[in-house]
Image (cartoon, helix red, strand yellow):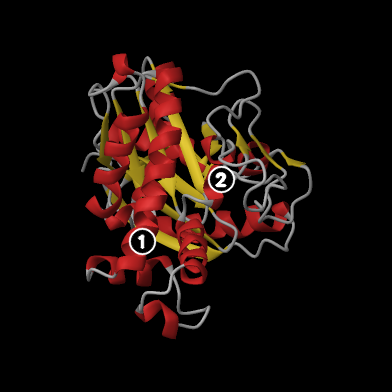
Amino acid sequence: MQDRDLVVGIDIGGTNTSLGFVDRSGRLIQASSLPTQAQDSPEIFAERLFQQIEELRTALPSLHHLCGIGIGAPNAHGCRGTIEQAVNLNWGETVDFVHLIRKYYDLPVSLANDANAAAIGEMLFGNARGMKHFMVITLGTGLGSGIVTDGRLLCGASGFAGELGHTTVDPNGRQCGCGKRGCLETYVSATGLVRTSRWLLAKRYNPSPHRTMTVQEMTSQQIFKLAAAGDALALEAFDRTARILGMKLADAVAHLSPEAIFLAGGLAAAGDLLLKPTEQYMNNFLFRAFRGTVKVLPSGMQPGESAILGAAALIWNELASSKQPDH
């Protein structure tokens, strides 16, 4: 039986870490997860991660060559191989995470922030196949963005290029977890949508099922359900969210001129409730030369698999670029 080439894709979150074995075509062969336990040291986490990988490896259905490891993580610096000042990880200022993983595996390791991993995943396995200029916007608790120009991930001089979520909508606006005020992600994200809905409840008098909900019950999923059922307040919350996102995407298009912008993450599951008005507002705000040149599209990767596939795509892309032999 011929050995199968596989990589490990790992997505590190503040609460949970997901991982899986992925082949060259983007097929997820085996997957698992473990609690991140962010209060522990990165060394303890790396050891637990190694044990989980090896446990999952024993369950693989066939012979294989492990070619490398791709990792998506918050505040990851791909060029340095470090995770720096990650808000939800109690790991201090800077952790050389690639070095920690190489204590267990003598393999190529590729690290990037989760939005950059999503962009490479979209290029290799999603709806951006064949494109050289595009953006991926991840809409979850916050807003992340990954930018690909001329077929390459844009990292910039600092290594942190593409932080669209922390561009300013209103300098006197909502408090952001980063310490600034008025960041885009405080308006356009799952939590931003909830904040908008609460603001509308205080400003409007029309009846809505929102008014009977507790703070815990008012989630982005509930707002989506109400909007889909025609609730005026929920629809206005989505419209305001789409308008702000469209405005900021128009700015991004003026800088980057992408072929397409892909929306991914939990809030993007709202589909046309968000996609269509966002594209319309973007075109309204665009400089005339760009109008009609950029599509706003859904991600082509399955929500339950996209984080692992994006991380795996990082290392597959690196291996293909360097033509590095498999280990």
Q: Does residue 29 sit above or below 295 in this rendering?
A: below
Residue drawn at the location 52% of the way across and 33% of the way down: 110
**Which of the pair 205/290 is nearer the observer?**
205
Q: Quadrant of residue 299?
A: top left
In the image, 77: left or right of 40? left
Q: Residue furthest right?
A: 92
Counting other residues with Cα less than 10 Å from the Cα at mark 2, is it few (<14), some (14-19), or many (20 or more)? Answer: many
In the image, 173: left or right of 210? right
Q: Quadrant of residue 45?
A: bottom right
Marks 1, 2: nearer the viewer: 2
Q: Does residue 310 sit above or below 193 in this rendering?
A: above
Q: Does residue 284 sit above or below 179 in this rendering?
A: above
Asked if marks 1 and 2 touch (Cβ < 8 Å), the reply is no
Q: Please, what is the three-letter code of the amino acid marked with disc 2? A: Ala
In the image, 251: left or right of 284? right
Q: Quadrant of the N terminus?
A: top left
Counting other residues with Cα less than 10 Å from the Cα at mark 1, is it few (<14), some (14-19), or many (20 or more)? Answer: few
Q: Please, what is the three-letter code of the amino acid marked with disc 1? A: Ala
Q: Secondary structure at mark 1?
A: loop
**Which of the pair 43/194 is nearer the observer?**
194
Pointer 2: what residue?
A: 73
Residue 119 placement (x, y as % from top left): 39, 34
Residue 224 placement (x, y as % from top left): 32, 65
In the rendered structure, find residue 59 and report the number of the disc placed on it.
1
Q: Secondary structure at mark 2?
A: strand
Residue 224 in sight in this render: no
Residue drawn at the location 50% of the way across and 46% of the way down: 143
Residue 245 placement (x, y as % from top left): 42, 41
Q: Quadrant of residue 303?
A: bottom left
